[in-house]
Amino acid sequence: MSFEIIQIPRDDEGIRLYLERHKAFRLLALKTDPDAFGSTFAREIAFTDDVWFNRLKNPQITTFLALRSDQVVCSISLGGPLPCTPEESSPSKDPWTILSGDPSAGEQSHWRGLGMFTLPSARGQGIATAIIARTVQFGIDEAAKSGKTAVFSIAVEHDNPAAVGLYEKCGFKTIIKEPWFRDRPRIALLLKYSPTSERSEASVE
């Protein structure tokens, strides 16, 4: 069955059009797979509509939805550009805390994938790969406006092999492993993807 990927607009009308679907899907994700996120269902169910609205309005957050028959089946947000490089950031800390500040200096613009989730019934069908590719292209295009190349990172728990496998398939490689203690001992991974490096390696081969 076909699907479409949409980027939620940041204007008030566009946000209101997708707000309830985004909110419902995010809460479903937190409830369905609580170990996959740095936040919790109990925390976000208490958010007011203003909090949800302001998340989508945030100029440093861009959210993408994959829709099938007008139902959200996959979602990811992209934060950036960030005031640090992937190597300077952490996979276990709340990524929302690093969104403030001036973007990092240098030739690269750093973007962080946030809140990635695909409905179990929609997995293995290329939807997640497609939405990541769309997100990456957005970051590349935005970085180019500042004369920079883009680099991406995403955090995942080490014992989530399906997610790790997906990101590796999309070109991400683990660069940081660190302890993560939310409700039990875990290991958080930070994966990095540099499209420019991938193209350079391909051209050499």
Image (tube, helix red, strand yellow):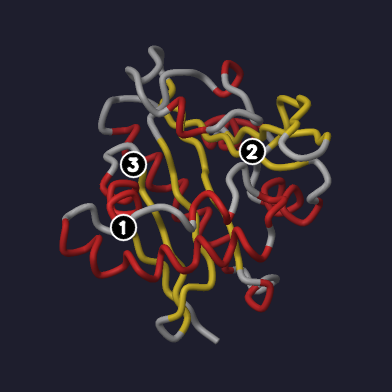
For mark 2, give the secondary structure: strand
Query: Does label 2 or label 1 sit earlier along the sequence?
Result: 1
Task: Tell me the mark number nearer the camera, choosing from 2 and 3.
Answer: 2
Question: Which residue lies at the image location 76% right of the left edge and 40% below the top edge?
Answer: 183
- Dot 2 amino acid type: Ala
Q: Which residue is mark 3?
A: 141
Q: Which residue is mark 2?
A: 155
Residue 166 horizontal side relative to residue 195, left or right: right
- Dot 1 amino acid type: Asp
For mark 1, give the secondary structure: helix
Vertical order, 98 against 205 (above or below): above
- Mark 2 and mark 1: Cα distance apart in space: 27 Å
- Residue 42: image quadrant is bottom right
Query: Does label 3 or label 1 sit earlier along the sequence?
Result: 1
The reply to whether discs 3 and 1 touch (Cβ–Cβ < 8 Å) is: no
Q: Indicate the position of residue 82 as horizontal and vertical percent values.
A: 42, 26
- Residue 32: image quadrant is bottom right
Q: Which residue is mark 1?
A: 49
- Residue 49: image quadrant is bottom left
> Can you say which quadrant of the picture contains the C terminus?
top right
